Image (spheres, rainbow, N blue to C red):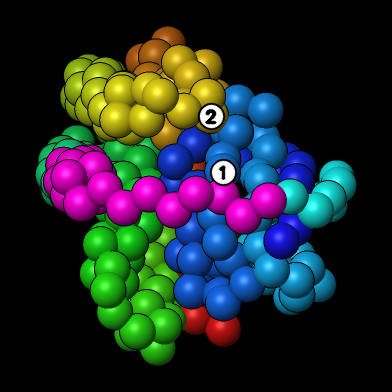
Amino acid sequence: MDKTTFEVSKMDCPSEENLIRMKLEDMDPIQHLDFDIPHRKLTVIHTGKLEEIESALTGLNLGVKRLQTKTVEPPAREENPDKRRKQRNLLWTVLAINFIFFIIEMTTGLISRSMGLVADSLDMLADAFVYGISLFAVGGTLLRKKRVAVLAGYFQITLAIMGFIEVIRRFLGVENMPDFSTMIVVSVLALIANGICLYLLQKSKSDEAHMQASMIFTSNDVIINLGVITAAVMVNWLDSSKPDLIIGAIVFAVVIQGALRILKLGK
């Protein structure tokens, strides 16, 4: 049995971890996966077929680089139904939080005319998709997982492209000033929600070294929330909608990038 360690330079938070799990866990050679998110490393225990595993990881475009491979003793198998149930409940919890804030941010974004909030809502939806695909595929076939991934990916891309079109329309047309106070309040609430999700994910794996508090500060979701808050301040300071449109365009690009990763699971 082999133990291969990979560097995954773009693995910043549980979303990337879930994508990797969905991609690899159905592969016959895989025996165990161990994630070290703060150090962006993945350890795979497998029985041969290293090229197949490396190819699957490379296809996710997460900056994968193989560091070393060595022969090890087979790990002891440990079935823990209670732990599995708790992890499933946790996934439902973080999915619900992300989906609720997708609705809140989409609604308030449209009402306040903020493309930043609309884009951030799609980022929340993207995370909900990742956790939802994980739940939906548990105990299911690889084909079902691929079909759900394709549907989720294309839906996400469609919404993001519509957002881009609206950003361009507003750039070229008359300025439509967003309500900066709504942007700040809702973004702060979303920031708290993301913090809660990350805390729960961290707490659930407190016995594993790869879930450290530092992941909270490196999460793309938190950075995006702070970006929308900054854009709101700039909107008020400059008396211009441009900062909101710029952050909206950036987040739409991030959403599309995440959707393309999800689509790769369908291949």
What amino acid is at disc 2? His
On the picture, is 11 further left or further right than 104? right
Q: CA distance from mark 1 to mark 2?
A: 8 Å
- Kindly identify the amino acid type of the residue bearing the numbered disc 1: Asp
Question: For the point 40% across and 24% down, which residue is it?
Answer: 207
Residue 235 at x, y percent in the picture: 40, 21
Prevailing secondary structure of the magenta residues: helix
Which of the 4 image quadrants contains residue 27? bottom right
Circle 1 residue:
34
Q: Which mark identifies residue 130?
A: none
Describe the element under mark 1 as helix, strand or loop: strand
Image: 200 above or below 99: above
Residue range in magenta is: 73-94
Residue closer to the observer: 76 or 97: 76
**Residue for point 58% across, 33% down:** 37
Q: Is residue 197 visible?
A: yes
In the picture of the structure, the residue carrying the numbered disc 2 is: 210
Q: Which image quarter: residue 234?
A: top left
Say which quarter of the image contains residue 143.
Answer: bottom left
Residue nearer the viewer, 8 or 69: 69
Residue 90 painted magenta: yes
Which quadrant would the N terminus be assigned to in this image? Answer: bottom right
User: Of callouts 1 and 2, which one flags the residue occurring earlier in the amino acid sequence?
Assistant: 1
